[in-house]
Image (cartoon, rainbow, N blue to C red):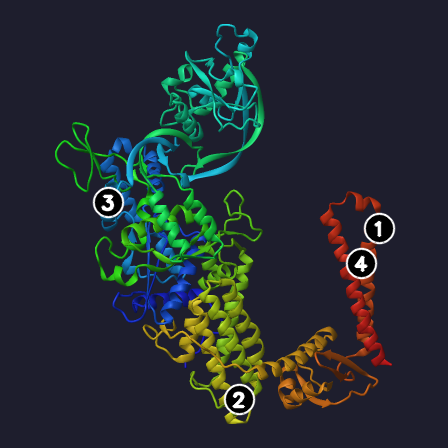
Amino acid sequence: MTELPKAHEPADVEPGLYADWEAAGLFHAEPDDPGEPFSVVIPPPNVTGSLHVGHALDNAIQDVIVRRARMRGRNAVWVPGTDHAGIATQTVVERQLAAEGTSRQELGREAFLDRVWAWREESGGTILRQLRTLGCSPDWAREAFTFDEARNRAVTKVFVDWHEAGLIYRGNRLINWDPALRTALSDIEVEHREVRGELVRFRYPLVPVDGSDPAEDAAGVVVATTRPETMLGDTAVAVHPEDARYAHLVGRHVRHPFLDRTFPVVADAYVDREFGTGAVKITPAHDPNDLALGERHDLEVLDVMTDDGTMAASAGRFAGMDRFAARAAVKEALAAEGLLEGVDEHLHQVGHSSRSGVPVEPRLSDQWFVAVRPLAERAAAAVRDGRVTFVPERMTRSFLEWLDGLHDWCISRQLWWGHRIPAWYGPDGEVRVQVASPGEGWRQDEDVLDTWFSSQLWPFTVFGWPDDTPELRAWYPTTVLVTGYDINTFWVARMLMAGLWFTDDVPFRVVHNHGLVRDEHGKKMSKSFGNVIDPLDLIERYGADATRFALLRSAAPGTDVPLAEEWVEGAKRFVNKLWNAARFAIVNLDGRRPGDLPPDDRLALEDRWILDTLHRAHADVDAAYDAYDWPVVARGLYGFVWDELADWYLEAVKGRIHGEDAVAAEDARAVLAHVLEAALRLAAPLIPFVTEAAWRALTGAAGGRDSLMVATWPEAAGRPDPAAAEAFATVRGLVREVNRFRSQLRIPPSRRFPLTIGAEPGVREVLSAHADLVAALAGLSGLEVVADLVEAAGTSSIPFPGGRAQVALAGVIDVAAELDRLGRERERVLAEAARVAERLENPSFAARAPADVVARERGKHEEALRVAAELAERIAALGGAAA
């Protein structure tokens, strides 16, 4: 049997095992393979990306799910791929061109696209290559790309079909405009950030009419705005119809101070009369609420900005200014005209482009839209009737609320990299939507589709749709979608809408939402905060298994995931513990491989206990795998391997394995092999490398298709034995207290001493029957169990659950020296308690120190008193013994 090296070095283990799995085709599946179909599709990362810690979490979870499905005999496929990431990818290449002193406009569309494709071929697969180092096992032969030929054909069909169904239309509507990238954005591509800005208050003078008061006309109407540059597009002032302050002004007009026009004062219930002055400036071309009000009152719509965020000719003397320069200039001009009433600091939410980071501008624009209401209603019904479930379930409510309030989706983008819109414009102005050009003289729409338009089709196009393929029939709908809760609206909802429309079925049965990875304090990871953790660094330093374990150990469904490097280091210690336990077992199994267990009547207490413990651990871990409850999986594996198998069972069987009773030794080896092999199978999906290496050494497996990765999942393990669990708990309770006694008195493990036990009848029976086991685990030279202890000089007591142990101290410790040491330690602790108490009693300290500092000092004082009391008890016990 192969022995494991003494030290576990991930770099020596992981790459070779991964190469072996891949070469053996263990990641690949065919639709007609045996087993119930099981499918997962990767949320395609941007082709521009490198592996960050969020990707690591998301893909580690998927890998765990798929690995377990394979072991359970499912025909499991995990489809990898990348997203063409329209804006992000175009931006990367445009920056390269700028560094070369040129631009995409100078190259022209076709040459620019050739350049992007060349970049994609050279650098676009980085993140998928990096997933290999994490141990991810997708079917690499099925790698897809959201902008490859197959996806392009599907996207075009979807656009044409939805247009024919009346779900896609072109309209002049208010959209989110990114002035930096000069493209439209959908609502979900806008991030709202809190910004410290200004609330500018100014007056619009009233246009005089017969009989009006000149003073009131000059005073006009005061309005307020955070975007004073938009006043250049104002076409009304609105007040509430029941606001008595302005009732007499409704129907009158105000004069624009910088442009040769006037506009009306209108009454509309939209206005909040309690906010500000109760009068609101209306800019229909640059605010969605203003546009709705403008449509109700048939107001003029004036766009005063250009594509790059500069002011248009309609802005008069401010034309050509950057929007933010115009903001300052308008304030100055208002002040010069005596119309500026005041400027207040104002904290408010401002929409920013998630692509470029600049503030977006609401603008009227001709764009293509999807009418989402019929699609959203179908999607919501599928969630409400249980065809799709969310894990955790609490995500369902917010998802449905978002669907119920969904607005039409702007899908056109003013970019070159992406799926070009299949709309054609004829010489006479006719517009046709179809796959191919209608003929000579027809011009294709210049715009491309939103990246999410193609990725919404991912779950079925990766299996060959729109063709009727064996893959589509076998693996669609997919079994589970793993994704962060933050893209439920970006992506999950759109996949659900598209899947139901085109396949008449949901694209996935379960949506498993995980949270965002944050630092150990719960703070968002950011380069500016200096708290970013690179998963590739973690893998290099601690190995893939430790990185995976640390991530999933905190990844409760739907909850943000804290991570610190020291936690990965702790996970590495667990991996090492498993390695060392397996190595010890394999060395001591003397060539025995896992097989049948001995007859029940030959099992020792520790055997029966570990089998019962394994049975319960398996039930808990198996259920947690089913529930996607990764912290429970990790804790269950950790507790069983470290606390039960390594710390207790291996210690308990050492004596039998090396004893003279050959049958007992062979029985111990049989149980040890069985339990270790079951533990390796249970842990394999989560920490695949260390378990594979240990399993091959344990079983003699040659690798390739003879791998733990495709071994049978243990549907049951161990055997229930409550009586053994109770009896071993009694043994363990005594051993723990003896070990604590050793630690307190600094008795080395090598020093053995006899123990006399007085206990309840049931406890006496267990300890009498298993005295040799107790002696071996506690390092005793002998164990005597009696009905009643007789107090004697020179002894010390060790209380334990159900009884009390007595140890003669002569020859075990130097009582006088120990009393002296404990006395000095107690004096030191009491002095510290007095010092802290003096500080707490100082009125100046209590008054000036922060509350957390005072609380910390009180805690120190209480702890010092507790330790002093404990030392006094130990001194008293030893003092009686010395007497």
Could you tell which of marks 3 and 2 lies nearer the N-terminus?
3
| 59 w.r.t. 201: above or below | below
Numbered disc in front, either 4 or 2: 2
Residue picked out by circle 4: 832
Q: Secondary structure at mark 3?
A: helix
The amino acid type of the residue labelled 2 equals Leu
Q: Nearer the viewer, residue 846 or 690?
A: 846
Numbered disc in front, either 1 or 3: 3
The amino acid type of the residue labelled 1 equals Glu
Would residue 85 be visible to someone looking at this image?
no
Q: Position of residue 197 (x, y in %)?
A: 54, 29
Residue picked out by circle 3: 161
Tag 1 near tag 4, CB within 8 Å: no
Residue picked out by circle 1: 841
Q: Position of residue 465 (x, y in %)?
A: 24, 54
Could you tell which of marks 4 and 2 lies nearer the N-terminus?
2
| 846 w.r.t. 284: above or below | below
The answer for how far apart the CA atoms under marks 2 and 1 are is: 63 Å
